[in-house]
Image (cartoon, coloured by chain):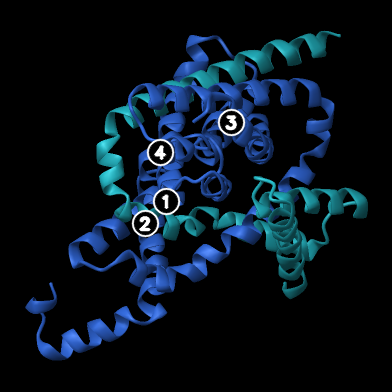
Chain colours: A blue, B cyan
Amino acid sequence: MHSLLPLPFFHVWSYLQTQPLLGLTATLCTWELACFIDARAGHKPMTNPTFLSITFLACALLLTGTPYSAYFNGAQYVHFLLGPATVALAVPMYANRHSIKKHFGPIFISLTAGSFVAASSAMLIARALGAPHNVLVSLGPKSVTSPIAMAIAQNLGGQPPLAAVFVMITGIFGAVICTSVFKLVRVKDWRAQGLAAGTAAHGLATARMILINETAGAFGGVAIGLNGIVTSVMLPLLVQMFGF
Amino acid sequence: MVRAIMILLLCQLVGTVVQEGTGLPIPGPVMGLVLLIGLLLWRGGPSPELHDTAHGFLKYFGLLFVPAGVGVVTELQVLQANALAIAVAIPVSTILGLVVTGVLMQRLSRSEDDA
Protein backbone atom coordinates (compact mmCIF):
# COMPACT_ATOMS: atom_id res chain seq x y z
CA MET A 1 0.00 0.00 0.00
CA HIS A 2 2.68 2.50 1.06
CA SER A 3 4.89 1.91 -1.96
CA LEU A 4 1.93 2.46 -4.29
CA LEU A 5 1.33 6.00 -3.04
CA PRO A 6 2.95 9.04 -4.67
CA LEU A 7 5.47 10.69 -2.32
CA PRO A 8 3.45 13.64 -0.93
CA PHE A 9 0.51 11.36 -0.13
CA PHE A 10 2.88 8.94 1.52
CA HIS A 11 4.12 11.73 3.82
CA VAL A 12 0.58 12.77 4.73
CA TRP A 13 -0.41 9.14 5.31
CA SER A 14 2.52 8.36 7.58
CA TYR A 15 2.02 11.63 9.47
CA LEU A 16 -1.68 10.81 10.05
CA GLN A 17 -0.75 7.36 11.37
CA THR A 18 1.08 9.00 14.28
CA GLN A 19 -1.91 11.22 15.16
CA PRO A 20 -5.23 10.42 16.92
CA LEU A 21 -7.26 12.42 14.36
CA LEU A 22 -7.57 9.76 11.64
CA GLY A 23 -8.55 6.85 13.90
CA LEU A 24 -11.15 8.92 15.72
CA THR A 25 -12.65 10.42 12.55
CA ALA A 26 -12.70 7.03 10.83
CA THR A 27 -14.57 5.51 13.79
CA LEU A 28 -17.27 8.19 13.78
CA CYS A 29 -17.65 8.25 9.97
CA THR A 30 -17.92 4.46 9.84
CA TRP A 31 -20.51 4.51 12.62
CA GLU A 32 -22.66 7.06 10.78
CA LEU A 33 -22.41 5.03 7.58
CA ALA A 34 -23.34 1.83 9.44
CA CYS A 35 -26.36 3.53 11.06
CA PHE A 36 -27.49 4.72 7.63
CA ILE A 37 -27.25 1.19 6.19
CA ASP A 38 -29.03 -0.26 9.24
CA ALA A 39 -31.90 2.22 8.93
CA ARG A 40 -32.22 1.53 5.19
CA ALA A 41 -32.32 -2.24 5.85
CA GLY A 42 -35.02 -1.82 8.51
CA HIS A 43 -32.86 -2.59 11.60
CA LYS A 44 -32.13 -6.26 10.91
CA PRO A 45 -29.92 -8.19 13.38
CA MET A 46 -27.34 -8.68 10.62
CA THR A 47 -27.12 -4.94 9.92
CA ASN A 48 -26.49 -4.07 13.56
CA PRO A 49 -24.39 -0.86 13.36
CA THR A 50 -21.78 -2.07 15.85
CA PHE A 51 -21.27 -5.29 13.92
CA LEU A 52 -21.09 -3.42 10.59
CA SER A 53 -18.68 -0.79 11.95
CA ILE A 54 -16.32 -3.40 13.40
CA THR A 55 -16.37 -5.34 10.12
CA PHE A 56 -15.73 -2.25 7.96
CA LEU A 57 -12.94 -0.88 10.15
CA ALA A 58 -11.26 -4.28 10.61
CA CYS A 59 -11.27 -4.77 6.81
CA ALA A 60 -9.90 -1.24 6.31
CA LEU A 61 -7.03 -1.91 8.74
CA LEU A 62 -6.20 -5.23 7.07
CA LEU A 63 -6.39 -3.80 3.53
CA THR A 64 -4.23 -0.75 4.28
CA GLY A 65 -1.82 -2.67 6.50
CA THR A 66 -2.44 -0.24 9.36
CA PRO A 67 -1.46 -1.66 12.76
CA TYR A 68 -4.28 -1.82 15.33
CA SER A 69 -2.20 0.31 17.74
CA ALA A 70 -2.13 3.19 15.19
CA TYR A 71 -5.92 3.01 14.87
CA PHE A 72 -6.47 2.72 18.63
CA ASN A 73 -4.31 5.81 19.16
CA GLY A 74 -7.36 7.79 18.00
CA ALA A 75 -10.16 5.37 18.83
CA GLN A 76 -9.15 5.25 22.51
CA TYR A 77 -11.12 8.47 23.11
CA VAL A 78 -14.32 6.66 22.16
CA HIS A 79 -13.22 3.51 24.01
CA PHE A 80 -12.69 5.46 27.25
CA LEU A 81 -16.40 6.39 27.38
CA LEU A 82 -17.35 2.72 27.91
CA GLY A 83 -16.64 3.07 31.64
CA PRO A 84 -19.00 5.98 32.38
CA ALA A 85 -21.57 4.48 29.97
CA THR A 86 -21.57 1.25 32.02
CA VAL A 87 -22.16 3.28 35.18
CA ALA A 88 -24.97 5.12 33.35
CA LEU A 89 -26.88 1.79 33.07
CA ALA A 90 -27.90 2.52 36.68
CA VAL A 91 -30.37 5.17 35.47
CA PRO A 92 -32.67 2.89 33.38
CA MET A 93 -32.33 0.17 36.05
CA TYR A 94 -33.52 2.67 38.64
CA ALA A 95 -36.45 3.59 36.37
CA ASN A 96 -37.47 -0.09 36.31
CA ARG A 97 -37.11 -0.54 40.07
CA HIS A 98 -40.84 -1.19 40.59
CA SER A 99 -41.08 -4.15 38.22
CA ILE A 100 -37.78 -5.49 39.58
CA LYS A 101 -39.06 -5.20 43.14
CA LYS A 102 -42.46 -6.69 42.31
CA HIS A 103 -40.98 -9.78 40.63
CA PHE A 104 -37.63 -9.87 42.39
CA GLY A 105 -37.73 -13.58 43.31
CA PRO A 106 -38.67 -14.92 39.85
CA ILE A 107 -36.37 -12.47 38.06
CA PHE A 108 -33.37 -13.23 40.23
CA ILE A 109 -33.81 -17.04 40.13
CA SER A 110 -34.52 -17.31 36.37
CA LEU A 111 -31.79 -14.84 35.44
CA THR A 112 -29.13 -16.47 37.62
CA ALA A 113 -30.07 -19.96 36.41
CA GLY A 114 -30.08 -18.92 32.73
CA SER A 115 -26.85 -17.01 33.09
CA PHE A 116 -25.18 -19.97 34.82
CA VAL A 117 -26.33 -22.43 32.16
CA ALA A 118 -25.32 -20.17 29.26
CA ALA A 119 -21.84 -19.39 30.62
CA SER A 120 -20.96 -22.87 31.88
CA SER A 121 -22.27 -24.70 28.79
CA ALA A 122 -20.33 -22.34 26.49
CA MET A 123 -17.08 -22.91 28.37
CA LEU A 124 -17.59 -26.69 28.80
CA ILE A 125 -18.42 -27.23 25.11
CA ALA A 126 -15.48 -25.10 23.98
CA ARG A 127 -13.13 -26.93 26.36
CA ALA A 128 -14.36 -30.31 25.07
CA LEU A 129 -13.56 -29.07 21.55
CA GLY A 130 -10.04 -28.11 22.57
CA ALA A 131 -10.19 -24.34 23.15
CA PRO A 132 -7.41 -22.96 25.42
CA HIS A 133 -7.86 -21.02 28.67
CA ASN A 134 -7.76 -17.51 27.17
CA VAL A 135 -10.53 -18.40 24.68
CA LEU A 136 -12.66 -20.07 27.39
CA VAL A 137 -12.61 -17.11 29.76
CA SER A 138 -13.33 -14.76 26.85
CA LEU A 139 -16.35 -16.94 25.95
CA GLY A 140 -17.72 -17.08 29.51
CA PRO A 141 -19.12 -13.52 29.62
CA LYS A 142 -20.48 -13.56 26.02
CA SER A 143 -24.12 -13.11 27.13
CA VAL A 144 -23.30 -9.89 28.97
CA THR A 145 -23.26 -6.42 27.45
CA SER A 146 -19.85 -5.72 25.80
CA PRO A 147 -18.13 -3.29 28.20
CA ILE A 148 -18.84 -5.55 31.17
CA ALA A 149 -17.90 -8.67 29.18
CA MET A 150 -14.58 -7.14 28.14
CA ALA A 151 -13.76 -6.11 31.70
CA ILE A 152 -14.65 -9.57 33.06
CA ALA A 153 -12.57 -11.31 30.37
CA GLN A 154 -9.60 -9.08 31.11
CA ASN A 155 -9.79 -9.75 34.85
CA LEU A 156 -9.81 -13.51 34.24
CA GLY A 157 -6.87 -13.50 31.82
CA GLY A 158 -8.83 -13.49 28.55
CA GLN A 159 -8.64 -11.13 25.56
CA PRO A 160 -11.11 -8.20 25.63
CA PRO A 161 -11.32 -7.96 21.79
CA LEU A 162 -12.16 -11.68 21.61
CA ALA A 163 -14.82 -11.18 24.27
CA ALA A 164 -16.26 -8.26 22.25
CA VAL A 165 -16.47 -10.45 19.14
CA PHE A 166 -18.11 -13.31 21.05
CA VAL A 167 -20.62 -10.86 22.51
CA MET A 168 -21.48 -9.65 19.00
CA ILE A 169 -21.92 -13.18 17.60
CA THR A 170 -24.08 -14.16 20.60
CA GLY A 171 -26.22 -11.04 20.24
CA ILE A 172 -26.82 -11.46 16.52
CA PHE A 173 -27.55 -15.18 16.87
CA GLY A 174 -29.82 -14.55 19.87
CA ALA A 175 -31.73 -11.77 18.10
CA VAL A 176 -32.31 -13.95 15.02
CA ILE A 177 -33.30 -17.11 16.91
CA CYS A 178 -35.11 -15.88 20.07
CA THR A 179 -38.70 -15.72 18.81
CA SER A 180 -38.49 -19.22 17.26
CA VAL A 181 -37.02 -20.64 20.49
CA PHE A 182 -39.83 -19.10 22.57
CA LYS A 183 -42.41 -20.57 20.20
CA LEU A 184 -40.78 -24.00 20.36
CA VAL A 185 -40.74 -24.20 24.18
CA ARG A 186 -44.06 -22.33 24.49
CA VAL A 187 -42.84 -19.30 26.39
CA LYS A 188 -45.63 -16.79 25.74
CA ASP A 189 -45.31 -14.48 28.74
CA TRP A 190 -43.84 -11.13 27.60
CA ARG A 191 -41.94 -10.69 30.85
CA ALA A 192 -40.33 -14.10 30.44
CA GLN A 193 -39.47 -13.47 26.78
CA GLY A 194 -37.87 -10.11 27.53
CA LEU A 195 -35.92 -11.40 30.52
CA ALA A 196 -34.64 -14.41 28.58
CA ALA A 197 -33.59 -12.30 25.57
CA GLY A 198 -31.73 -9.80 27.78
CA THR A 199 -30.09 -12.53 29.85
CA ALA A 200 -28.93 -14.80 27.01
CA ALA A 201 -28.20 -12.22 24.31
CA HIS A 202 -28.02 -8.74 25.96
CA GLY A 203 -28.86 -5.54 24.04
CA LEU A 204 -29.10 -7.01 20.56
CA ALA A 205 -31.88 -9.46 21.40
CA THR A 206 -33.49 -6.88 23.69
CA ALA A 207 -33.63 -4.41 20.79
CA ARG A 208 -35.56 -7.08 18.89
CA MET A 209 -37.95 -7.52 21.85
CA ILE A 210 -38.54 -3.75 22.11
CA LEU A 211 -39.91 -3.87 18.54
CA ILE A 212 -42.36 -6.63 19.47
CA ASN A 213 -43.65 -5.65 22.92
CA GLU A 214 -42.99 -2.83 25.40
CA THR A 215 -43.11 -5.00 28.54
CA ALA A 216 -40.71 -7.49 26.96
CA GLY A 217 -38.37 -4.60 26.12
CA ALA A 218 -38.42 -3.28 29.70
CA PHE A 219 -37.66 -6.72 31.15
CA GLY A 220 -34.86 -7.10 28.60
CA GLY A 221 -33.34 -3.86 29.83
CA VAL A 222 -33.57 -5.04 33.42
CA ALA A 223 -31.89 -8.33 32.46
CA ILE A 224 -28.96 -6.59 30.73
CA GLY A 225 -27.99 -4.64 33.84
CA LEU A 226 -28.69 -7.41 36.35
CA ASN A 227 -26.90 -10.05 34.31
CA GLY A 228 -23.87 -7.79 34.10
CA ILE A 229 -23.72 -7.72 37.88
CA VAL A 230 -24.59 -11.42 38.34
CA THR A 231 -22.02 -12.60 35.76
CA SER A 232 -19.30 -10.37 37.22
CA VAL A 233 -19.73 -12.14 40.55
CA MET A 234 -20.48 -15.64 39.24
CA LEU A 235 -17.93 -16.13 36.47
CA PRO A 236 -14.76 -16.03 38.61
CA LEU A 237 -16.39 -18.69 40.84
CA LEU A 238 -17.39 -20.78 37.80
CA VAL A 239 -13.87 -20.63 36.41
CA GLN A 240 -12.55 -21.88 39.73
CA MET A 241 -15.25 -24.54 40.08
CA PHE A 242 -14.69 -26.13 36.67
CA GLY A 243 -10.96 -25.36 36.66
CA PHE A 244 -10.98 -23.54 33.30
CA MET B 1 -23.90 18.07 31.72
CA VAL B 2 -20.48 18.52 33.36
CA ARG B 3 -21.90 17.70 36.78
CA ALA B 4 -23.61 14.56 35.44
CA ILE B 5 -20.38 13.38 33.79
CA MET B 6 -18.58 14.13 37.02
CA ILE B 7 -21.01 11.89 38.96
CA LEU B 8 -20.60 9.03 36.45
CA LEU B 9 -16.80 9.32 36.50
CA LEU B 10 -16.68 9.59 40.29
CA CYS B 11 -18.73 6.38 40.64
CA GLN B 12 -16.42 4.64 38.18
CA LEU B 13 -13.36 5.97 40.01
CA VAL B 14 -14.58 4.79 43.41
CA GLY B 15 -15.49 1.41 41.88
CA THR B 16 -12.05 1.10 40.28
CA VAL B 17 -10.27 2.11 43.49
CA VAL B 18 -12.26 -0.51 45.42
CA GLN B 19 -11.52 -3.17 42.78
CA GLU B 20 -7.80 -2.44 42.66
CA GLY B 21 -7.62 -2.08 46.43
CA THR B 22 -9.44 -5.29 47.31
CA GLY B 23 -8.43 -7.40 44.31
CA LEU B 24 -12.07 -8.46 43.82
CA PRO B 25 -12.66 -9.83 40.30
CA ILE B 26 -15.73 -7.58 39.74
CA PRO B 27 -14.93 -4.84 37.16
CA GLY B 28 -14.63 -1.30 38.53
CA PRO B 29 -17.35 0.16 36.25
CA VAL B 30 -19.79 -2.55 37.45
CA MET B 31 -19.08 -1.57 41.05
CA GLY B 32 -19.61 2.04 39.98
CA LEU B 33 -22.97 1.00 38.50
CA VAL B 34 -24.03 -0.63 41.77
CA LEU B 35 -22.83 2.45 43.67
CA LEU B 36 -24.90 4.76 41.45
CA ILE B 37 -28.03 2.60 41.91
CA GLY B 38 -27.48 2.96 45.65
CA LEU B 39 -27.08 6.73 45.29
CA LEU B 40 -30.26 7.00 43.18
CA LEU B 41 -32.28 4.97 45.68
CA TRP B 42 -30.96 7.17 48.50
CA ARG B 43 -31.52 10.46 46.66
CA GLY B 44 -34.91 9.43 45.24
CA GLY B 45 -33.94 9.40 41.55
CA PRO B 46 -31.60 11.10 39.08
CA SER B 47 -31.63 14.85 38.43
CA PRO B 48 -33.02 15.72 34.96
CA GLU B 49 -29.44 16.52 33.98
CA LEU B 50 -28.11 13.11 35.04
CA HIS B 51 -31.10 11.41 33.41
CA ASP B 52 -30.45 13.11 30.05
CA THR B 53 -26.68 12.57 30.15
CA ALA B 54 -27.08 8.88 31.05
CA HIS B 55 -29.53 8.38 28.19
CA GLY B 56 -27.15 10.26 25.89
CA PHE B 57 -24.40 7.78 26.75
CA LEU B 58 -26.67 4.77 26.39
CA LYS B 59 -27.97 5.95 23.01
CA TYR B 60 -24.42 5.56 21.67
CA PHE B 61 -23.60 2.38 23.60
CA GLY B 62 -23.17 0.55 20.29
CA LEU B 63 -20.55 3.03 19.07
CA LEU B 64 -18.51 2.84 22.25
CA PHE B 65 -17.45 -0.76 21.83
CA VAL B 66 -16.43 -0.43 18.19
CA PRO B 67 -12.74 0.41 18.98
CA ALA B 68 -12.34 -2.69 21.17
CA GLY B 69 -14.20 -4.84 18.66
CA VAL B 70 -11.86 -3.78 15.86
CA GLY B 71 -9.15 -5.37 18.02
CA VAL B 72 -10.35 -8.63 16.46
CA VAL B 73 -7.70 -8.01 13.76
CA THR B 74 -5.11 -8.95 16.38
CA GLU B 75 -6.99 -12.17 17.26
CA LEU B 76 -7.72 -13.63 13.83
CA GLN B 77 -5.34 -16.55 14.34
CA VAL B 78 -6.95 -17.46 17.67
CA LEU B 79 -10.41 -17.30 16.06
CA GLN B 80 -9.29 -19.50 13.17
CA ALA B 81 -7.61 -22.05 15.45
CA ASN B 82 -10.76 -22.36 17.59
CA ALA B 83 -13.40 -21.90 14.89
CA LEU B 84 -15.18 -25.22 15.59
CA ALA B 85 -15.31 -24.73 19.37
CA ILE B 86 -16.72 -21.21 18.92
CA ALA B 87 -19.19 -22.23 16.19
CA VAL B 88 -20.69 -24.92 18.45
CA ALA B 89 -20.38 -23.31 21.91
CA ILE B 90 -22.04 -19.97 21.13
CA PRO B 91 -25.28 -21.17 19.44
CA VAL B 92 -25.86 -24.09 21.83
CA SER B 93 -25.21 -22.09 25.01
CA THR B 94 -27.30 -19.14 23.79
CA ILE B 95 -30.31 -21.39 23.07
CA LEU B 96 -29.89 -23.09 26.48
CA GLY B 97 -29.76 -19.69 28.21
CA LEU B 98 -32.91 -18.50 26.40
CA VAL B 99 -34.82 -21.68 27.25
CA VAL B 100 -33.79 -21.90 30.93
CA THR B 101 -34.47 -18.21 31.68
CA GLY B 102 -37.69 -18.05 29.66
CA VAL B 103 -39.29 -21.26 30.95
CA LEU B 104 -38.34 -20.59 34.60
CA MET B 105 -39.52 -16.97 34.50
CA GLN B 106 -42.84 -17.95 32.90
CA ARG B 107 -43.49 -20.65 35.54
CA LEU B 108 -42.38 -18.56 38.52
CA SER B 109 -44.12 -15.31 37.61
CA ARG B 110 -47.32 -17.19 36.73
CA SER B 111 -47.46 -18.90 40.12
CA GLU B 112 -46.76 -15.49 41.68
CA ASP B 113 -49.61 -13.87 39.69
CA ASP B 114 -51.97 -16.64 40.81
CA ALA B 115 -51.00 -16.29 44.45
Q: Point out the frontmost of discs 4 and 1.
A: 4
Q: Where in the figure is residue A49, as x and y percent of width and height?
A: 41, 51
Q: Nearer the viewer, mark 4 or mark 2?
A: 4
Near mark 2 (Cα within 10 A), the count class, few <14, some 14-19 or many ≥20, is many
Label 2, on which residue?
B70
Q: In front: A41, or A238?
A: A238
Q: Nearer the viewer, mark 2 or mark 1?
A: 1
Crowd class of label 4 (few under 14; some 14 to 19; many from 20; radius 10 Å):
many
At x 20%, y 66%, the residue is: A65
Name the residue located 20 percent from the left edge and 67 percent from the top edge: A64
To which chain does the residue with label 3 belong?
A: A
Look at mark 1 in the image and give the residue it sits on: A161
Q: Residue at x 58, y 64 (%)?
A: A81
The residue under the point 42% across, 51% down is A161
Q: Kindly report which numbered mark, 4 or 3, lies closer to the viewer in this rendering.
A: 3
Callout 4 touching callout 2 (CB < 8 Å): no
Residue type, label 2: Val
